Amino acid sequence: MTRILTLTNHKGGVGKSTSATNIALGLTRVLRKMGAPNNRVLLVDTDSQGHATLVTTGRNDFGTEDSLYRVLMADRQQAPQVMADTIVQSHWDADLHVLPASPLLEGAERELMRVAGAPYRLAEPLSRIADHYAAVIIDTRPSFSLLTEMGLIAATDAIVPVEPRYLETVGLMSVIEKIADIRDGWRVPNLRISGVVVTKVDTRVRGHRYLLDQLKQHDILGRLFCGVIPANEAVSYAHSEHQSIFTYDPQASAGVAYLKLVGTLLHRVFKAGV
Amino acid sequence: MPKRNGTQKLDALLGSITADLIGGEQQPIAEHGLRVENLLMEMVRPDPVQPRRVLPETLHHSFHDNRLTPTQSLRELVQRVQVAARQRGRPFTNVLELLPDADTEQGDAEAKLSPEEQLLRDLVHLAVTIRDDGQVNPLTVVDASQGVTRLYRIETGERRYWATWLLRDFIPNYTGNGTIPCIVIPAQRSSVFRQAKENTARSGLTAIAMARQAALLLLTVHGYEIPAYAVNNDFYRQALELDLRGHREHTDAILSAMGGIDKRRFHQYKMLLKLSDDALELADRHAIDEKKLRYVVPLDSDLHTEFVQQIVDLNLTSRQVEEICAAGIDTAEAHTDDTVSLPAAALKLARLTLTSQKSTPQDIARALMQQEGDAKIARVRLQGMQKLLADAEEVLTSSIGLPG
């Protein structure tokens, strides 16, 4: 079964899109290097801001006919084909495919609020085409909206990026509770929280070090802890060039950390030996 | 290190994380046999072809066509009732005000509630019961899940469903978690016969709902596909072409599911589907008996709504309806040879003269009040009618040369 990883946190600016895009590319590259028979990865952008779409495709002009919007509004029977037709190749790697977002997704969300079974509108077609990919990565918007709910219902694994601050940790609790509510409420028994990634870490800051230690020592969160991404300006520069951190500066500390994170996820989620 | 106070807060925070929240150990839900589950209210949907309708016709279709959420549907209902109640001099702002007050119950009983007011009052009452005593009786739902999409269609308990939404979104002190207890029936064990039995076993099924129920059973045994979306009356009217002949093996089951009625009664209910759409809706809203409606069926379909409205407004008995309708048919037949066609409203007014002695002035005054909701407007209407009748008498007088 293809693992579907959803990166979620209702707090904005914690590095969801950056992590989603770099994990997606990292998986493609590492699987290829491992000689995996299938190293195609699909990146699904459910955030109407479309940042993940912009950096991986170089475009932010997707509309009703060539974005996730079309998939969500499609007839149930036709949705898998529509999804397959809407997916584009990223300009980062031929094996990294993207289901692009559009600013119109907010409108779709309003329209779908009235539709029975709306929260499954991503999961349903994705379940039909997921086998084509080695992994699917879903980027979500910074809110607990219907689209975020869709991303989590479609997922097998939730990955929560979080900044090392007290209030962000408070937010982490509500994210974990929300995911549990979705798993139990919408009957997604396979959905589990598989990782907590601490982003924008500055080890010179005493509070960051303390919080990292506390998370690592925690009975449960310690086991979920899967990576530390240092604060690194190279990430911003890579974004502005519409490049991955691996391409922009393979030696950058954030790039090295993302590669390590990909290795951990392959081991933990995909049970692959790396 | 951060301050001690901050450390304690963080410890408390991290201490609230439990393994249950993380998940991954759960087993998929067993898909065999009946089970009782607390289902998220959003995953449960009323059956769009259920003969027993809870919401008024237009709201029913808007909801099932995905143009309204459950909350929006109820808000629309509440607003409609607010308008109707205001016109009757009973304005309210909170739905709880609809519940009868023991001190003023006598007065309220005199003022008849509109069907929508009665519906909302019943739902509020049920909602408050659920709030205070819990949902004792689970809904019966059919597992209508497809692929990974989880969806449950209500077989019985639609009123409880709407009452629970009302409780969640419109009534204070809801303490639930957004779920509703349901007995889940696997899709392959879904049965229109069981649904029909549940419907007819309880009181309150209107004659029109019985007609729809009869149609649904007939269509099912004749192999028609029952859609999973809201249908209009023409879908049920297909049953007018069908009967129980050739389906002896199903006849007993159908009649039993209809509450143990005989074939003749079954036919009488089915024939109600010949009524026009507006007449069907009106008759359903006001729960008019089949015994009254059967006399309206043979009339021209253009007259159906007017006649049903008269039944509602004047609270006619089945005998009165029979007499009026018989006169209506006679008049219509008499006019078939007549080259002059008269307006339907004039014909209706003329027919009313045949039964005018059966109503007292008090009844007419009360009926006018009920129709208009305002004594002044009712009086103006009456004065207009008086003038019209006086003018008509003048025309009669002059045309046949009677002395004035």
Image (cartoon, rainbow, N blue to C red):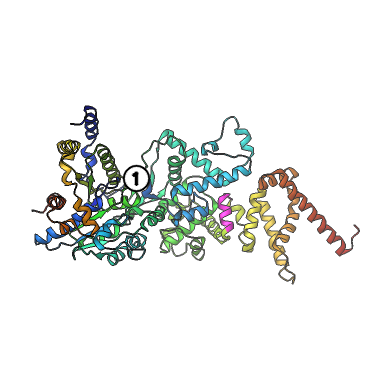
Q: Residue furthest top?
A: B4
Q: Is residue A2 visible?
A: no
State which quarter of the image contains the N terminus of chain B: top left
Q: Does residue A224 lie above or below B321 as drawn?
A: above
Residue A100 is situated, as x and y percent measured from the top left of the image, at 29, 61
State which quarter of the image contains the C terminus of chain B: bottom right
Residue occupying the point 72% across, 68% down: B341
Q: Secondary structure at mark 1?
A: strand
| Front residue of this view, candidates B207 and A18 | A18
Q: Is residue B110 visible?
A: yes
Q: Residues within 10 Å of mark 1 (few under 14, many from 20)?
A: many
Question: For this view, does A232 lie left or right of residue B44?
Answer: left
Residue B282 shown in magenta: yes
Residue corresponding to mark 1: B39
Prevailing secondary structure class for the magenta stretch in the rendered image:
helix
Residue A113 shown in magenta: no
The residue type indicated by label 1 comes to Leu
- Residue A131 image-quadrant placement: bottom left
Residue A272 is situated, as x and y percent measured from the top left of the image, at 11, 54
Residue occupying the point 71% across, 43% down: B375
Residue A102 is situated, as x and y percent measured from the top left of the image, at 34, 59
Q: What's the chain of the residue with tag 1? A: B
| Front residue of this view, candidates B2 and B234 | B2
Span highlighted in magenta in the image: B278-288
Residue occupying the point 27% across, 43% down: A175
- Residue B391 image-quadrant placement: bottom right
